[in-house]
Amino acid sequence: MEEMRNVELVEGDEGRMCINMEWGAFGDNGCLDDIQTEFDLAVDELSLNPGKQRFEKMISGMYLGEIVRNILMDFTKRGLLFRGRISERLKTRGIFETKFLSQIER
């Protein structure tokens, strides 16, 4: 949030405005390579634009459910969840929606 008096592109001085920093493409130059997980890489690889918007794919709601689905698959393969049995539904891309994370936390 930014004070309107500091936003040069719009008229008016009163109130505050939400500024979209457009950080989604941050990391496309490889500067995030050291912190990207195998799950981040899998989501990026199967996305419509591999190698682009890498930071966004690591943090945004559009992708978090798929990252968690990949983590659940990995934990299940290791025998840590679901007695090591992966359901067909869990194998389905996009089946685990990000809203489920909020529901679980709640």
Image (cartoon, helix red, strand yellow):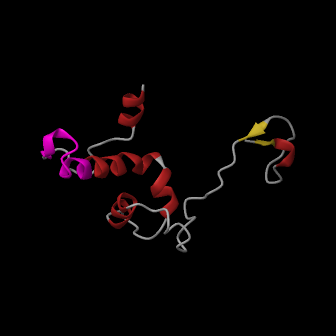
Depicted 84 relative to depicted 33: above or below: above
Q: Is residue 102 above or below residue 47?
A: above
Q: Position of residue 103 (x, y in %)?
A: 38, 29
Which residue is drawn at the image coordinates 48% and 49% (left, top)? Answer: 60
In-front residue for pair 20/26: 26
Q: Quadrant of the N terminus?
A: top right
> Where on the picture, by quarter, is residue 85?
top left
Q: Position of residue 42 (x, y in %)?
A: 33, 62
**Residue at left 18%, top 52%?**
77
- Give yes or no for residue 106 being in the magenta stretch: no
Nearest to the observer: residue 41 or residue 37 = 37
Above or below 23: residue 18: above
Left or right: where does residue 2 sit relative to residue 96? Answer: right
Q: Is residue 77 magenta?
A: yes
Give, as a single range, the part of the protein colored magenta. Answer: 73-87
Please tell me which residue is depicted at 55% across the width and 59% down the height of the picture.
24
| Visible residue check, residue 35 | yes
Location of the C terminus by quadrant is: top left
Q: Residue furthest bottom?
A: 29
In the rendered structure, the answer to whether residue 79 lies left or right of residue 66 reads left
User: Whole-percent x and y of residue 93?
Assistant: 25, 52
36 relative position to 4: left or right: left
Counting the numbered discs, the total is 0
Percent coordinates x, y for residue 14 in the rendering? 85, 35
Q: Give whichever of 64, 76 is nearer the camera.
A: 76
Q: Which residue does the image show at 22% across and 44% down from the upper left?
A: 80
Q: Is residue 91 visible?
A: no
Q: Using the image as rendered, state which of residue 3 and residue 74 is in the foreground.
A: 74
Going by the image, does 88 lie left or right of 43?
left
